[in-house]
Amino acid sequence: MKLSLVIPTYNEKENIQKLIKKIQEEFKENKINGEIIIVDDNSPDKTGDILEELKKKQKNEQKNLKIIHRKGKLGLSSAVLEGWKIADGDVLGVMDADLSHPPEKIKDLFWEIEKGKADFTIGSRYIPGGKIKGWNFKRELMSKAATFLARIYTKVKDPMTGFFMIKKECIKNKEINPKGFKILLELIIKADYKKIKEIPITFINRVEGKSKAGTKEILFYLGNLIGYLFYKKKVIREFFKFAIVGGIGTLVNISILYLLTEKIGIYYIFSAIISFIIAMTSNFILNKVWTFKENIKLKVGKKYLQFSLVSVAALSINLFFLYIFTEFFGIYYIISQILAIGIALIANFLGNKIYTFSR
């Protein structure tokens, strides 16, 4: 097999020559028939010019370097797809230009596919043996949150990495068009593959240059997540079932609260606690058996505790957004509550799908 490794660049003059040298050394040492495709988005720091000079110098030595110059900053994912259009390889790969991904792991990702052990390999930071060096707390928190949300669609531990390889045939005739930085999750959802394998890597935060991640990329990612629901009809069905169960639970809660307080004469605070527990138990059973189709006996005690914790967390989210919308945005409290319930419902569903009912 031949490997086509695409590297998107934007202002990477400090790193790109070092990276290309290391990759070419890896190809040679490990007898990998590989090509490097650099897609530069008209970098103001003249990365494109540096690449052309390098290509001229290597003309008689290396014939495995291709360069695409684009008119402007058009995005990482589109750069990957544009590079793949001119790829000659049977295996398509991606890695970052900032030396954060270890070139010495190229052989491990490629050989798993070459030997027929996988169709799709991922350089993972979040499996045993994987590490991240140099991130601050905020960056790590954002990555963990994005990874957590992605678990709606996949059990891959690191669907946010930018270092992976896939057989070209796996994306044949597939419409791949993510916005922003993160293309891997879209491939996990849409590509045709039989076996996917994660390989541990050590991710080192860039030393030279500036990270391109920002608020815009977060919004793109959230938009992608919503769009992927249409490819996972099972998730949509589960969400609507979860919402129906929530509605039933609300009726159970109110009915028991009224019965205990008005008919039996129990103090309303105690009635509210009892009715909440009964409604939550009813919701747990219905969601376990109907929404997520689990055996009622499967880890019932542990899952009931998990369900309770998620329910309390969702209640906290409800109260938090009720306060924010009412006090900071001046929205009428009834409207605020409706909005807050909607947000809490989504959080409750995600929490239970990912944490409670993930088997």
Image (cartoon, rainbow, N blue to C red):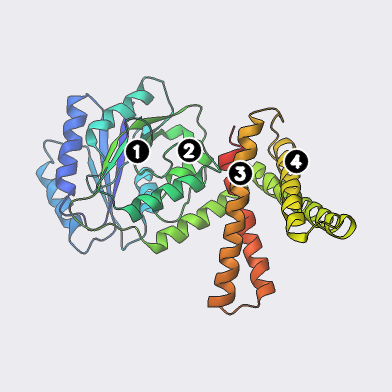
The x and y percentages for residue 35 are: 26, 36
**Residue 153 shows in the view:** yes
Q: Is residue 347 above or below residue 186?
A: below
- Closest to the camera, between mark 3 and mark 1, is 3
Task: Give the mark nearest the N terminus, 3 or 1.
Answer: 1
Task: Give the mark nearest the N terminus, 4 or 3.
Answer: 4
Please state which amino acid type lies under the numbered disc 4: Leu
Q: Is residue 33 above or below residue 132?
A: above
Helix, strand, or loop for circle 2? helix
**Residue labelled with disc 3:** 352
Q: Residue at x 57, y 47 (%)?
A: 351
Please state which amino acid type lies under the numbered disc 1: Arg
**Residue labelled with disc 4:** 286
**Residue labelled with disc 1:** 125
**Residue 55 shows in the view:** no
User: Label 1 crowding class (10 Å Cα cut-off): few <14, some 14-19, many 20+?
Assistant: many
Left or right placement of residue 123 versus residue 251 in this view: left
**Residue labelled with disc 2:** 171
Q: Which one is in front, 269 or 80?
A: 269
Work out which quarter of the rendered image holds the C terminus and state it.
Answer: top right
